[in-house]
Amino acid sequence: MRYIFILLFLFVCGLFNHYAFSKILQDTLWTRDLSNEGGVNHVGFINHDTQIAVSSESANVHIYDIQTGAEFFSKHLGSLKAVAEINGKDYLFLTIGDSLIQWDVASKQQVYFYTDIILKDSIHGLPRKKFIESVSVSPLLNIIAIGYRTDRLDIQDKSEFSINIYNIGNNNSIRSINNGYSDRVIVQFSPDEKYLATSVKGLGGYDVQLFDTKTWLYDVNNILYPQHNDLINGITFSPNANVLATGSQDGKVRIWDIQTKSLIDIPNIDCLNIGDIIFSNLKSILIFGSSYFLNGNILGKITFYDLVKKNIIQELNKDYDYDGGIVCIDRLDRYLVCSGYGNIKVLKADSLTNSVIINKKDVESEIFPNPTTNHIKLDLNKNYVCYSFKIFDLNGKMISEEKQIQSYIFDNSFEYNMSSFKQGIYFLSLETSKGVITYKIVKEQ
């Protein structure tokens, strides 16, 4: 009986997957004009994804309600580089010159300050100027990775790149990685925090180097080939950390299998330049901003790419006035935030959540309710905070939703009574501090 259900599940997934994702809504909830501040620099979700923090090129930070666009906060703080939830609290990581500030969202106060004292002004007497280009935070490992560009002021167009690792809340760098001479450095921890990915200028092109966070040793086998032909603008991991994707100024997106370190896809797209790049939390969609050439003009668009079928689901183009730079999505795929020529735009993406069809590779594990009690029980990672859950049927229809999840958690385990559910296959989606985790439930009686 179990195998009949599994075969039915695979058939329906193949039938409905493209249909469900093709209904991505394009409704603009609200827009804010930041052109007088030079446009948008960075965006991140805060307060359980009910608000967004936005920094402008003028280093002003704004906090908006995600649904209405109402502004709660505005102040000149610095350039936003990362947003992270640490021990249940939200922090903004902002740069001022060569230093990094950790800012508490709740108290609206600076709590920590990180700066590279040794390399701040000069090395071996050579005049230098240092800039922070990228920041990634690992709450589980309690560390921050900061990618620096150091310009030699005595030699024009001569820059060196390095990555410093700090313990959160400690200004002493615990490790430094020399990234050599390059043009840009990007740092990004994988969701399982096993790897730190960084962009590297190699021989004849631009590579992605993976560093094992246990050893931090350079390993030529952890370089992802083939190379991009121009600067890498974005690095992103799938929520299950099995896939990595990059976007480059060469107009290409490359997708790798992390376990085998092999290239698995180069989407067939017509772009001049790839900007920001992210995975949907439904795990089988890649979203990226890009620029393209049309009738003598350079325009921007947002592309939704199906990783399973390897085709473009939808493109939001010039009619929606996107610059192809910044894209950001919340943990439940309800809101898509993007930049548009000095504006910040928030779009509805409800159909990504309301019509969930999960590919079999995206499911964390298969659950069978206890035949006597009809209860399901999941052991939870103690490092994750659980916010809510939803249960969907095989067609993607939401059967149950609970936003107050604590009444279902006992001794760090999630328990739920499936007695009222008919025989069949269901999907349980837990919203956690690490994103949405999906389980397949097989109810045999």
Image: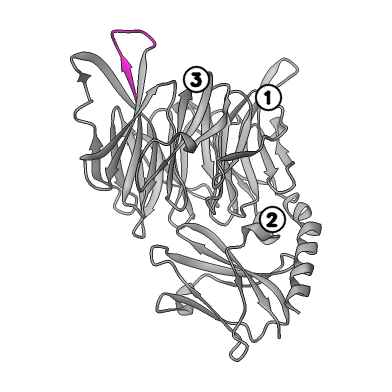
Residue 325 visible here: no
Q: Earlier in the sequence, mark 3 or mark 2?
A: 3
Real-space CA distance between mark 3 and mark 1, rounded to the nearest whole angstrom: 28 Å
Residue 346 visible here: yes
Real-space CA distance between mark 3 and mark 2, rounded to the nearest whole angstrom: 44 Å
Front in this rendered view, residue 72 or 169: 169
Colour option used: one colour
Q: Secondary structure at mark 1?
A: strand
Residue contact between numbered discs 3 and 1, judged by CB atoms under 8 Å: no
Which residue lies under the disc numbered 3? 203
Give the image quarter of residue 312: top right
The crowding category of the residue bearing disc 1, from other C-alpha atoms within 10 Å (few below 14, some 14 to 19, many at least 20), is many
Lateral position of residue 413 relative to residue 230, left or right: left
Residue contact between numbered discs 3 and 2, judged by CB atoms under 8 Å: no
Front in this rendered view, residue 220 or 303: 220
- Seen at 22% across and 13% down, the residue is 126
Q: Specify the segment rendered in magenta.
A: 149-157
Q: Residue 1: x and y, percent?
A: 76, 79
Real-space CA distance between mark 2 and mark 1, rounded to the nearest whole angstrom: 27 Å
Q: Is residue 83 magenta?
A: no
The crowding category of the residue bearing disc 3, from other C-alpha atoms within 10 Å (few below 14, some 14 to 19, many at least 20), is few
**Of the residues shown, which amino acid type is indicated by label 3?**
Leu
Q: Residue 248: x and y, percent?
A: 57, 28
Which residue lies under the disc numbered 2? 351
Give the image quarter of residue 15: bottom right
Q: Secondary structure at mark 2?
A: helix
Which residue lies under the disc numbered 1? 292
